[in-house]
Image (spheres, helix red, strand yellow):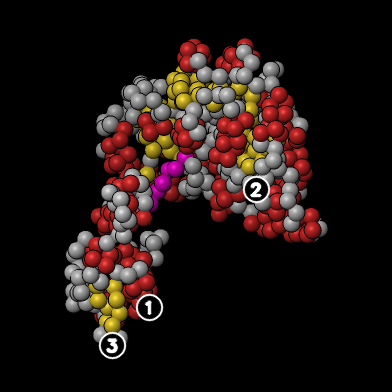
Amino acid sequence: MKELTIPIRAKDRIPIYEQIYEYIKCDIRDGKISDGEKLPSTRFLAKLLQVSRSTVELAYDQLLSEGYVRALRGSGFYVCRLAELEPVRGKGIQRPVREAFGGQGPEGQLEKRCQLAEDRTDKPSIRYDFSPNDIEWPEFSMNAWRKAARRMLQEPMEELFQAGESQGEANLRQAICDYLHQSRGVSCHRSQIVIGAGNEYLLLLLHQLLGDVKGIAMESPTYRQACQIFSNMGWKVAAIPMDDSGMELPELQRSGMQVAYVMPSHQFPLGTVMPMGRRSQLLSWAGEQPGRYLIEDDYDSEFRYRGKPIPSLQGSDPYGRVIYLGTFSKSIAPAIRVSYMVLPPELMAPYRERCGFYSSTVSRLQQQMLYHFMKDGYFERHLNKMRSIYRARHDRLTALLRQRPWVLRLRGEGAGLHVLAETDPVLPEQELVARAGALGVRVYGLREYMISEGQPQPWGEHPVLLFGYGALDEEQITEGIRLLDQVFGWRP
């Protein structure tokens, strides 16, 4: 019987029984525990690791159910022969599953999980994640959402359980239409709005709607997930560099693309607000030829902490060439999975012909809950509350960064859920990110959002780090920045 010294991370999000299971499983697969070897008894291992016996039993039961060990009544648990653990290979298959699927098949996933389990014993967990994508979900008003759910359930059930409209429920589309008009200056009728489960689905609809389009121009750096979606759809992606005003128009014209994807109100990740002059140039470009369109992704436009809200590009469009995209993922919660698209009038007939028969991808019940959440004023109050919370975090973060000698310049302040810091080039950007991670702080380098190989950064060669503050409170922000001081060798 081999004595197992398993490092237990009591504060880890992974349950302790799963940590034990993963450790033993990896040792079995790596040959560190031999075929037929007996595992320690549950009582002995529980005492050794100072955990409950039931925790060890859960781990052993999982190993047993997956065939890594076998149980002999009255004797204990024994490791199965490695031959019994070999993946089944059919006739004609020349490579293991993990190789055929680029390491992402069942075997690849197992190998990756084992590697992660081993890595966790050597590396500190991330304590402060300055993710630009996370939000403060505990502040969400669940009572208000429950009230909206009760209002929804008071409606006739025979209607709620029928198939809804393909574009989304008419009352929700009207509520979105009113909200967009009042807060974003969007000019539309509810008949132009299409509701879908996430921007990814809406972009797939656009691919079918703009069937003759073979490529798209995108700002670089940009939202890489959208870039990946377009690439998966078979579109050629032209990376257009940016200046301080946004997408460079001469480069857009030279690209030969008919569609451009822009984020004029608060560009991700640069935080650029596109001035009216550049907006007019883009609108003129779109109006010059039939079939040209601008996709306006109104990224986290709800959160602005200085001055008036920036109006949408769509509201200034005299040609009807702007396709407007918005989502509730940042303003409410990612799990809502409700996004919306405002189509130009000239695309409505092609939409009904090509996509109008699709069923809505958002549950009718969820749409009605969201409708009541908006109609009864909860959404507006929630936004006001979150603006106040995020403004305090934004102000705290920017104040701390301005005090640091290793920060040369801040960019993208005053809006959204992240800021950028141009830093002292004591180390390359990737190494700064890696050293921060070793201290338990996750930051994000600007280069990872570039979509063109070898393209220079917009602001020269100084390292630029993204600091999101949506999911960190002010105390966590303070501690995270203090840890980063060590990366730059500065002591306040």
Closer to us: mark 1 or mark 2? 2
Residue at label 2?
Answer: 362
Asked where in the image residue 149 lies, by quadrant, the reply is bottom right
Residue at label 3?
Answer: 74
SS category of the residue bearing label 3 = loop
Name the quadrant of the C terminus: top left
**Residue positioned 28% across, 49% down in the render:** 95
Name which residue type carries label 3.
Answer: Gly
Specify which label sits upstream in the sequence, 3 or 2: 3
SS category of the residue bearing label 1 = helix
Q: Residue 39 at what x, y percent from top left?
A: 24, 76
Specify which label sits upstream in the sequence, 1 or 3: 1
Q: Residue 368 at what x, y percent from top left?
A: 73, 51
Q: In the image, which residues are magenta?
A: 127-132
Q: Nearer the viewer, residue 36 or 414?
A: 36
Residue at label 1?
Answer: 54
Q: Main secondary structure of the magenta part?
A: loop
Between the C-alphas of marks 3 and 2, the distance is 54 Å
Closer to us: mark 1 or mark 3? 3
Name which residue type carries label 2.
Answer: Val
Q: Residue 399 vs residue 122: left or right? A: right
